[in-house]
Image (cartoon, rainbow, N blue to C red):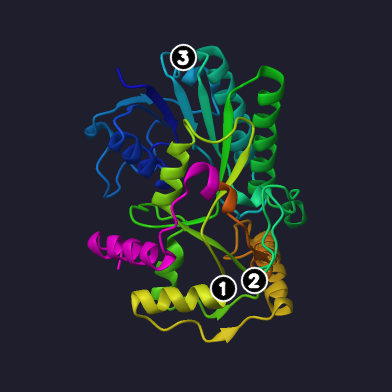
Amino acid sequence: MPPTILVTGANGFLGRHLVAELLRRNYTVRALVRPQNHLAASPLPPLQSLPIECVTGDISQPDSVAGAADGCTAIIHAAALARVNPARDPALWAANDAGTATVLELARQAQIERLVYVGTANVFGFGTQAQPGDETQPFAGARYGLDYMDSKRAATNRVLRAVADWQLPAVLVHPTFMLGPGDAKPTSNALLLELYRGRLLGCPAGGKNYVHVRDVAAATVNALDQGRVGESYILGNQNLSYREAFQLMAHVIACPPPRWPVPAAVARLVGVAGDWQARLTGRPAQVNSAMTAVANDGHYFSVQKAIAELGLPQTPVAQAVAEAFAWFKEHHYV
């Protein structure tokens, strides 16, 4: 009988790829999805149509997921709320920190053999393109005042405490910025749509690391029986400035790249203006000062540890862009 893996967040962008990768390797999959999930009317086939078991619950409400991991060999905890606007949002703490506490308790009660926690590279200190940050660098994101980063750092600390205090057999993986097909909401791949529609008017001063979502899924599933308990692994690929990234993306999807650099000082002013607009209207503006502060920095990371210990693939970022945009075209987003 193949091992049964519980996947939280199974209906999300990464979660869908995790389910596909697990099925490809002949695992038995139990998918935990929220009631009336936000992808119910998406162009993706419903999870219920796949050869998996679906259970309904919300990790921010522990009673609703009681027993969800019973009979499972392992858990991949990929459920999270990822948004940065508004910068402060209690819902992020309920989903990311308290929700992780719920999943850790499920793992303990079910005596699972491995938990793979999906975090974010933003919980580590970033570096330059010449000297990128890695898993040894302390959290640098507190400067931004973003509940997303702060809650994910708190959740990471929870997992590490469970390893130390409960001897929980957990491995932690931390993706960078994921691109690829099947982003129905869309989430990170919305950047490609904005670029294609001519809504990106300039290039911020900073940059980030990009990775194909299928590479993240492959390394995350590898972590079920590879990697060291209690260790963190950054899952990424290519470090690109925003100018480099937008030029690459524009070339692949055949549209003009943004022409003008946005000086850091100008970006800060735009962010402050967004903060004031939000205060006056009671609704988030298009950007806030936390978002522009992030855009001004280079969030560059080394992924050598994950390549060496988790077999992280390195699909070219240009291929991830091409596949994402082809999927958008096929499903009439553009």
- Distance CA(mark 3)–CA(mark 2): 44 Å
Circle 3 SS class: loop
Rendered view: 89 above or below 5 = below
Chain part drawn in magenta:
307-334
Asked which secondary structure carries label 2, the reply is loop
User: Which mark is first along the chain, 1 or 3?
Assistant: 3
Could you tell me how far apart the alpha carbons at marks 3 and 1 are, in whole angstroms?
Answer: 45 Å
CA distance for labels 2 and 1: 6 Å
Mark 1: amino acid: Tyr
Residue appearing at x 53%, y 76% in the figure = 244
Marking on residue 206? 2
Residue marked by disc 1 = 242
Sequence-first tag of 2 and 1: 2
Q: Position of residue 167 (x, y in %)?
A: 65, 19
Q: Amino acid at mark 3?
A: Gly
Please state the horizontal and vertical placement of residue 294, each as a whole percent of the image: 67, 63
Q: Secondary structure at mark 1?
A: helix
Figure quadrant of residue 7:
top left
Tag of residue 207? none
Identify residue type, mark 2.
Gly
Residue 99 in view of the camera: no
3 and 2 marks in contact (CB < 8 Å): no
Instruction: Say whether marks 2 and 1 touch (CB < 8 Å).
Output: yes
Left/right placement of residue 180 relative to residue 95 reads left
**Sequence-earlier tag: 3 or 2:** 3
- Residue 252 found in image quarter: bottom left
Residue at the spot of label 3: 67
